[in-house]
Image: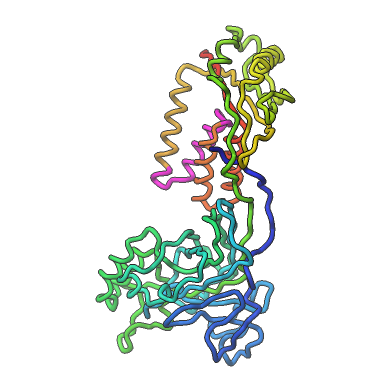
Amino acid sequence: MGLLLLSCSTIAQNLVINPSFEDSLGNLTKSFASKGWLDDIKYSSVDIYSTIYPEITGYAVPNNYLGYHPTLDSSSYIGFALFSWGGDLERITGSLSSTMQKDSSYRISFFIKYPKDSFMVYSKFIEVYFSSKKPRSKYGEPFFEECFNEKCPLADLKINIEEAVTTVQWVKCQAIYKAKGNEKYFTLGLFYQNRDFFKLSKRYNKSLLDSKKQLKFLKKTELFPIYINKNHHVDLINKSYGFREDRSCAYYFIDAVSMELIHPMLVKSFVKSKFKGDIDSFFYSRLQFPETPVNKGTYGDLIVSFLINENGKLDSIRVQQMPNSQIASKVIKILQQTDGMWSPTIENGKAISFKYKLVVRYQIFSGNQKNEYNKIKEEVLRNIQASKFKIALKHINTLLSLNPYNSELYFIRSDIYKSLQQYENALVDYNTATQIQNEILAVLGFIFST
C-alpha cells in the first residue's frame, strides 16, 4: 500500500474561530467568555484584556495591572498562568471552523508575550492537546490533585517559548501537527508529556516551602525561576506570609492564534504499479557499460520518466537527465521491452494512469567510499539519539549529496529539522520523501572503483 501526495501547496485559511479574542461574550464581572474559546477550569480563570476596559479595572489595553502591553493588531488578547504555586494549571481551549482531515498536516501558530517584570517563574515549553470533543473540566483541576490521580492527558505537541522571556516584544511560535482525524478543539497549556511529573509532585509536595526543594522541582519539570537570591535559592517565599503567589507563577499573554492546513491528506488507497518479475535482474542482465567510465565520460545519473496506463502499458517515455546519450539509448530500449509487464496503478480501487521514474546511477567510488557512507549514516543516528541535531544535520546532508534518491534519508532529515524547529524545511523534506516513494519505481546502481 502506497501513499499519494495530492498537493503540497499552502492553503492560508485560518481555521481558528475568533483568533484574536475580539468577539467577547462576557465582562469583568463574569467568568471568561470569548466566542469560540472555552475556559473550563474549576478553580481559576483565564483573563481577557481589551481596549474596551477602563484602566482602573487592571485589564485594559495597552496599560494594565501588569504594565504596558499593547496588542499586535487587534483590540484584545488573553492572559493565563501555565503554572502557579497555588496549584493551578490554567489552560485555554480553542475551536476550529471545520474538523481536521486524517493524515493531513496543519501549522499551529500564535504570538506569546511574557510580563517578566511581574512574575518570577517561566516555562520553557507550552504544550498543545487536540481533541474531537470538548475537554472535560477534570483537566482543569489543581495540578497536584490532577497529577496524583493521573488524570492529565498526554499532549500532542510541545512548543518552545523560551525566547519570550528574553524580550519585551510579542514572539511568534509555531509547530506542525499531523491530524489523527476529526479534531475540532485544541488546548494550550501544560500537560507534562513524557515527564515523570506524577512522582515529582508527590516527592516535593510536602516540602515546597523550602526554597532548595523549589529549585529542584522547577528544574526537573522544565520550569525556571527568573530571580534567584544570593544563596542561589528561588526567592518565592515571604517569611511572614508564606508563598508569594501573586508573583510565583508562569503567566503569559497569547494573541493571534492560527491553525492552517498546509497540505491535504495523503490518500492511503494508492497502490504503486509493480513489475511482473525482478526489475533489478531484468536490467542488470541486459545493460552493460564500458570498463573505463572516467575516460569515456559515462558516469552520472540517468533519469527516465514514463507513463503506465490503466492497462499496464508503457507510454510517453522521456529522458529527463542523462550523462551519456549512448547509455540513455540502451536504457530506453530495455525499458520498452517491459511493455505489458507492469500492473496498473490503483487509486481508490480503480486502475489509473500514473507517471513514474526510473533512475540508473553510474557511479565511481574510491576504495572505501561505500564503507564511509555506512559509517556516516551510523553517525547520524548516534547524534540524533544524543540530541545533537545540528551535527546530525551536517552528516545527513553529506549522505544526501551522495544519494539524493533515498526517501528514508529525507524522512530522517525532516525529523531533524522538526527537532530544530525549522518547520518549513521539515515539511519540504517530508513531501520530497513521499514524492520519491510514490514516483520512483526503481533505482539501479552500477558502481566502479578507482
Left/right placement of residue 278 relative to residue 11 reads left
Badge count: 0
Q: Is residue 348 above or below residue 423?
A: above
What is the quadrant of residue 364 in the picture? top right
Magenta span dominant secondary structure: helix
Image coordinates for residue 298, horizontal then vertical, percent: 64, 14
Viewer-closest of 292 and 90? 90
Q: Is residue 269 above or below residue 290?
A: below
Q: Position of residue 259 (x, y in %)?
A: 61, 62
The reply to whether the magenta stretch includes residue 385 is yes
The residue sitting at 69% across, 73% down in the picture is 73
Query: Which stretch is magenta?
Result: 384-405
Residue name at image x 61 percent, y 38 percent = 435
Where residue 17 appears, as percent x and y from the top left, is 63, 70
Q: Determine if residue 67 is in view.
A: no
Q: Is residue 429 above or below residue 46?
A: above
Whether residue 48 appears in this view of the structure is: yes
x 46%, y 63%: residue: 125
Q: How is the image coloured?
A: rainbow
Depth order, front residue of 422/215: 422
In the image, farthest residue toward the top? 291
Q: Nearer the viewer, residue 151 or 126?
A: 151
The residue depicted at 63 percent of the width and 22 percent of the height is: 301
Instruction: Report x, y in % for residue 266.
Output: 59, 46
In magenta segment, residue 72: no
Res 340 quadrant in image:
top right
